[in-house]
Image: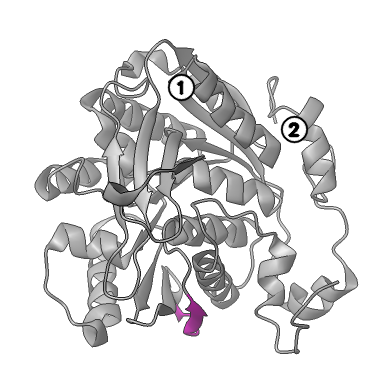
Amino acid sequence: MGSNPLDRTGLYALVRRERGVSEHGKRHQRSDWNRRNYSSYIVDGGPWLNILCFGEPLIRLATTGYERLEDAHILEVTYGGGETVVAASLASQGENVAFASKVSANRLGTNSLMMLARCGVDTSRVLRSNERMGLYYSERGRSIRPSIVTYDRSGTAMAMASHTDFDWDQMLNGVDLLFFSGVTPAISEEMYEACKEGLYACRGRGIHVVCDLNYRSTMLEPSVAFERMHQLLPNIDELIASEDDILSISSANISKNEMFDYCLTKFRGLFLDYPLRSACFIVRQSDRYDFGSFRGALLTQNGEYFSKTQRAAITDLSSSGSIFAASMVHAQCCKWDPQFCIDYATMASAYKATLAGDLCFATETELASLLADTAQPSIRQ
C-alpha cells in the first residue's frame, strides 16, 4: 500500500467492519448463498483495490413528491454529485474508497464530508477553502413530464481552485484505481488541467483510470466537451456512459427502437479510436406509465457482452447512470466474468431507479441476489 495507506481508523474502520470488510481491506467470507449463486462467475480473485474518486460534492435541493420548483414550499436537503454518488455506492458494495476534492470550509461542506464518512469513505484527501458549496435543484418528472435539474455551481470551492492545489503524488499514494467523471474537467479550465495532470500521474504509476462521461450540456458546449475528452481519453483505461451522454454530444434524433444500436455503434468507434481496455454504456428508457427498461453493453478487447433487459417501476431516474458506473467498477474489481459484470451493473441501475434521491446504499449481496434464478421473498424479515 505505501507509507500513507487509506485510513483504517475511527468511524471509517467501524463502517467497513459492519459492511463485512477486514482491517486489511479484504472481504470477510461471503455467505453460503453468495458462494452458491455467483462464485462461478469469478475469474480471478485478485488483490483488493484501493479506489480514489476525484470530484465535487454538491448540495441537492429537491422538491417533495412530484412538485415543480415554482410550486414548492419545502425543499429537501441532501448531497450528491456524480463522483460523490459513485464513492458512496462503491463503499456500500465493500470497496476501499477515498475521496479527493476541494470543499467549502463551512458547515454545509463539513456535513457533505460527514455523509461520505458515514458510508465508509476516507475524506482525508479533501482540501477546504472559504468559497461556497455548489448546489442543484431537482424536480422529479411524472408520466410525460421529464425530470429537471437546475445547477448553481459558479464560484464554488472547486470552480475557484487552481490545478496546482492538488498534489497528485500525495493523493495517489496507495491508490490502485482513479475514478472521475466528465463533469470535473468541465467545472473550469483549471480543473481540466488538474484532471490532465492526474491522468498523467496515474499513467506513470500504472494506476487504472475509469471515466464516467456524464456530460452536462449546461456546463460546456458539446464541441468544447468533446475536445477536452479527446485530450483525456488517451490516458483513460475504461469509459462509461449512458444514452443521455451519447445523445447530448452527438445531437442526433434517434427513436427509442434505434437507441441501443446507435449507442453501440458510437462506442465501437470510440473503442477503435482510443486505447481503451474496456468501454460500457447503459440505455434507460421509460414509458408514460413510469415503467422503465434498462439494458447495458460492455466492450472489451476480448469481445462484446450485452445484459439482459431489466424492467422496473421508476421512482427517480437521477443518478441511475452513476450507480451503473459504480457497480461496473466494483464488478470488475472483483474480476467477475464480463457477462456477469454487465448484468450486475445493469441490475444496479434499475434498482436505483426504484429509489428517490441520488444516493444508493445497496450492497453487493442485495444486487447479486436480484440476478439469481431462485424466487425471492416479497418481504425479507
Does residue 251 appear left or right of residue 24 in this picture? left
**Sequence-wise first label, 1 or 2:** 2
Instruction: Tell me what residue is drawn at x 37 percent, y 34 percent.
Output: 135
Q: Kindly identify which residue carries mark 1.
A: 103
Magenta segment includes 306: yes
- At x 66% / y 59%, what residue is drawn? 362
Q: Classify the position of the N terminus by image quarter.
A: top right
The amino acid type of the residue labelled 1 equals Val
Q: Quadrant of residue 16?
A: top right
User: What is the C-alpha distance between the residues marked 1 and 2?
Assistant: 19 Å
Count of picture labels: 2
Q: Main secondary structure of the magenta part?
A: strand
Q: Position of residue 55 (x, y in %)?
A: 43, 34
Instruction: List x then y, in percent, for residue 29.
Output: 88, 59
Q: Is residue 300 above or below residue 131?
A: below
Q: Secondary structure at mark 2?
A: helix
* 77 with respect to 124 (left or right): left
Q: In the rendered structure, which segment of residues is drawn in magenta?
A: 305-313
Is 221 or 27 nearer to us in this picture?
221
Q: Residues within 10 Å of mark 2 (few under 14, many from 20)?
A: many
**x 46%, y 22%: residue:** 103
Q: Is residue 24 visible?
A: no
- Dot 1: element: strand
Give me the disc on residue 258: none
Q: Give the residue pinned by disc 2.
A: 12
